[in-house]
Amino acid sequence: MKYWLTFIGILMTTIFGGGFLIRFIRDSDFYIVEFILGMIGIIILTIGIFIKATMKRDENPFLR
C-alpha cells in the first residue's frame, strides 16, 4: 500500500506527460487535458514520495 501513489504518479506522468511532450514538440499543439493530467501525475508522485519518506522516518526509532 505504500507504493500505490508513487506507482500511479509515475504511470500518469509517463502516459499523459509523455504524450503531451511528444505532441507539443512534433506538432506544436498544446493539449490542455494531457498537460493537466501530467501535472496531476507529478503532484501525486511527489505526495507518494513524501508519504513514503515520512513512513520510513516513523519506522526508525533512532530518528525521533
Image (cartoon, rainbow, N blue to C red):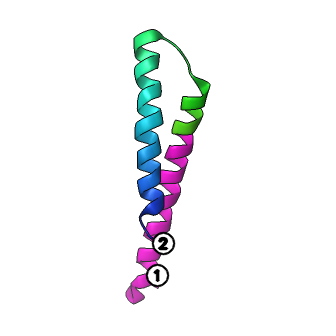
* Residue 49 is a magenta residue: yes
**Residue 55 screen position, x and y as percent:** 46, 75
Say if mark 2 contacts mark 1, CB within 8 Å.
yes
Q: Which residue is mark 1?
A: 58
For the residues labelled 2 and 1, the Cα–Cα distance comes to 6 Å
Q: Residue sitting at 56 percent across and 38 percent down? A: 37
Q: Which residue is mark 2?
A: 54
Residue nearest the observer in this picture, 53 or 9: 9
Compared across the picture, whether 54 is left or right of 60 comes to: right
Residue nearest the observer in this picture, 45 or 27: 27
Instruction: Classify mark 2: residues with Cα within 10 Å, few (<14), some (14-19) or many (20+).
Output: few
> Image quarter for residue 56?
bottom left
Vertical comparison of 26 with 8: above or below: above
Magenta-tinted stretch = 39-64
Vertical comparison of 29 with 7: above or below: above
Q: What amino acid is labelled 1 in the image? A: Asp
Residue 63 shows in this picture: no
Instruction: Classify mark 1: residues with Cα within 10 Å, few (<14), some (14-19) or many (20+).
Output: few
Secondary structure, magenta segment, majority class: helix
Q: What amino acid is labelled 2 in the image? A: Thr
Secondary structure of the residue carrying tag 2 is helix
**Residue 20 screen position, x and y as percent:** 47, 26
> Image quarter for residue 23?
top left
Secondary structure of the residue carrying tag 1 is helix
**Residue 36 screen position, x and y as percent:** 59, 35
